[in-house]
Amino acid sequence: MEIDLSGALMSQYKRAKREYEIAKGKKNESIAKKKALECAKLLREMAKYDKYGEKRYLEKAKKWELVANNIGVVFNPPKANKSKPKTSRSSNKTDSKIKGDEVENEIDKFKNFVRNNLIEKSNIKWEDIGGLEWVKKLMMETIVISALQRPASIQPWKGILLFGPPGTGKTLLASACAGSLEATFFNVKASSVTSKYYGESSKIVSALYEVARELHPSIVFIDEIDALTTKRSEGVSEASRRMLSTLLTELDGFQDKGSDRLVLTLAATNTPWDLDEAVLSRFSRRIYIPLPDKGATKEIIKINTKGLELNINLDEISERCVERYYSGRDLKNLCQGAIWNMIRDVNKDLYKMANLSYKELRRRKLKTRPLTDDDFEGAFKKIKSPLTKSEIEKYEKWGEEFGG
Ligand SMILES: Nc1ncnc2c1ncn2[C@@H]1O[C@H](COP(=O)(O)OP(=O)(O)OP(=O)(O)O)[C@@H](O)[C@H]1O
Ligand SMILES: [Mg+2]
């Protein structure tokens, strides 16, 4: 039987709120922050007991988390030369004129940007991914450890680097992590943030982690992390350098700022050899996401032909795919090609139906039949992997030296 604790929680909440006000009056940052977080935690608890008020409690909890995260800034506004945006019209203001609420507005601006542009909904589940069993297991373990009550010395991985050839499921894995947890999923392509928001990219990263902590559990996925690294020969822009240094600071500091909240950073790259030491050291787990082997290939083909019968020699087809260095993306395209061949075969003159009204089309059904080796044969001709043996060996060699 469930026991209703909402009354007791409410009085604890009121007490914490009073204590927060007192600490605020005394400008005692650490106690104010602690009390604000306590308020948020109690509200989240209360949300569990009141199904009608759940949304309201959670919204209030988020506000308290925002207060807690911004306490340092509000109590001690940073000096203007650090915080003032390059584009700001207030450039003629002196340092001392920068006020707490202005700083808050700027933080809010970037946080709103993050909320509106970098959060994605993920419906991907682990079973949507073929093969990669041990990677999936490691990620599930990381998530479980971070959620369980545990001694302080046991910390889950904060950053995991996924490296490997294009189309092998790196983005898919990150989405599955978020989808399985119902976590907030932040999808950030490093190069597009630096190119579109040049001077502001490092502030976007700070805001990103603040929002990620507020909306925990969160998965922050940083795609093409190599775009930020300093090891590239063609040189890296000042914006990338600053974005990277903020990112590294966030990866270092997150534990202190909210160890009970899961904010897992997953980064992906196709060119791990471009990453420098500073980046590698923050990602203590570096996982090779290889091309699918025969077993994984079979699974990926089944995933991508779901709902259709397979009248094929799956063993033989899979072997051919492995020999041709097909990635998961190639396999998806192969299946799509085979499906199209089948559709065209059993729905002759399909295009002629384009004359019919939408309403009429909705009444008719697309004919299908089991997929055959011939359907795949045609599709094979159109799909060529861009990879060579020596490129694959390069990944393997890097993995042996730096992976793990
Ligand atoms: N292991 C897999 N299981 C099922 N589908 C896969 C798998 N790997 C790739 N795919 C298919 O290929 C598509 C591309 O995969 P994904 O975007 O995850 O690759 P990636 O490794 O992130 O590639 P890139 O390095 O180019 O960003 C997926 O949307 C999915 O349809
Ligand atoms: Mg990707």
Image: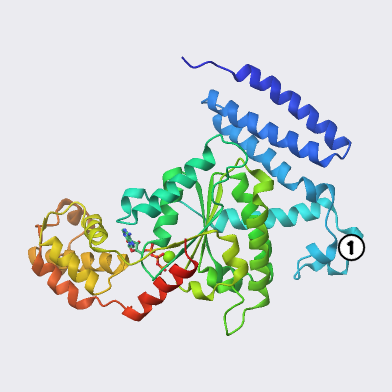
Which sits in the foreground, 70 or 258? Answer: 258
Judged from the image, the quadrant occupied by ligand 2 is: bottom left
Q: Position of residue 84 (x, y in %)?
A: 79, 64
Q: Amino acid at mark 1?
A: Asp
Residue 38 located left or right of residue 79? left
Q: Answer above or below: position of 68 versus 94.
A: above
Q: How is the image coloured?
A: rainbow
CA neighbours of label 1 inside 10 A, class few (<14), some (14 to 19), many (20+): some
Name which residue lies at 57% across and 55% down. Answer: 116
Please give left or right for residue 372 compared with residue 15 in the image. left
Q: Is 175 situated above or below 67? A: below
Camera-side residue of 78 and 324: 324
The residue under the point 26% across, 78% down is: 384
Q: Position of residue 223 (x, y in %)?
A: 50, 65
When asked about the image quadrant of residue 96, the answer is bottom right
- Can residue 355 be seen here? no
Q: Position of residue 266 (x, y in %)?
A: 51, 58
**Depth check, front residue: 338 or 380:** 380
- Residue 54 seen in render: yes
Q: Nearer the viewer, residue 188 or 228?
A: 228
* Quarter where residue 24 is shown: top right
Q: Residue at horizontal 61%, vertical 82%?
A: 235
Q: Where does label 1 land, which residue?
A: 95
Outermost bottom residue: 234
Image quadrant assignment for residue 54: top right
Give me the residue at 59% from left, 18% from top.
Answer: 5
- Percent position (x, y) of residue 258? 65, 44
